[in-house]
Image: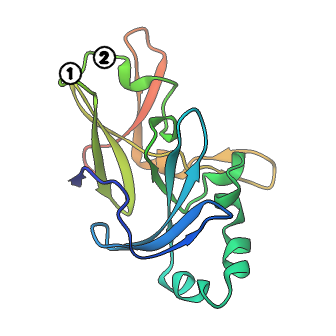
Amino acid sequence: MILLHWHGALQQKIVNAKKFFRIGFCEELQAYIMETNVAWIANYDRYYAISEEDFRNYETAPERFCEKYSREIGQRQDCFTENFIGSSALRDYDGRIGFQNEYPAARKNPFAGYGYAHGILYAHIVWKNGEFFVPPIQKTQKQNDEWVYPLRESCTLLRDSSGMPLCYCLNASQ
């Protein structure tokens, strides 16, 4: 696990202002990334892994790129694909609303940046009772309309003091 205070700095950046995304190479992550801008109460970015080939082909076939990544760009319920690696907003992480404020923080803000492992930006949450790495929500819909959450397979469900589900956390051995 690598600890980061990452802010989505991309090199060789290409901007698509009409569809509100940027693509480029992230030196710190050693990966090609697409950042989509989400206009919510406050603007924030979602981060998706893309292939080097897709990045290189964008200039000659931008419509093909946009078609391939239409779910990610479209920001509908199905935008949290296997390509989703993180977000600058904790609302896109796998916990209930406001999970980061459930326990007393060990510092002013319980969000301490990211832990980067296996190509995923886990939210690094630091409470007085420990450090936790919460995965972004990745969900895919199966043929029977059931949702599957692949990152939960390597996580443990953390519960609050009353036993209610709070958030998923990466297992320490991962």
Where residue 87 sits in the image (x, y, percent)? 46, 48
Front in this rendered view, residue 127 or 44: 44
* Helix, strand or loop for disc 1: loop
- State left or right for residue 172 relative to residue 46: left
| Residue 156 in which image quadrant | top left
**156 w.r.t. 127: above or below:** below
Front in this rendered view, residue 134 or 29: 29
Q: Are marks 1 and 2 in contact (CB under 8 Å)?
A: yes
Report the Cα–Cα distance between label 1 and label 2: 8 Å
Callout in the foreground (1, 2): 2
Front in this rendered view, residue 107 or 19: 19
* Helix, strand or loop for disc 2: loop
Name the outermost residue toward the top: 162
- State left or right for residue 64 relative to residue 93: right
Name the outermost residue toward the right: 144
- State left or right for residue 138 relative to residue 140: left
Amino acid type indicated by mark 1: Asn
Residue for badge 2: 103
Position of the N terminus, as image quadrant, is bottom left
Query: Residue at the spot x=50%, y=71% of the render?
Result: 23
Count of numbered badges drawn on the protein: 2
Query: Residue at the spot x=39%, y=57% of the render?
Result: 120
Residue for badge 1: 129
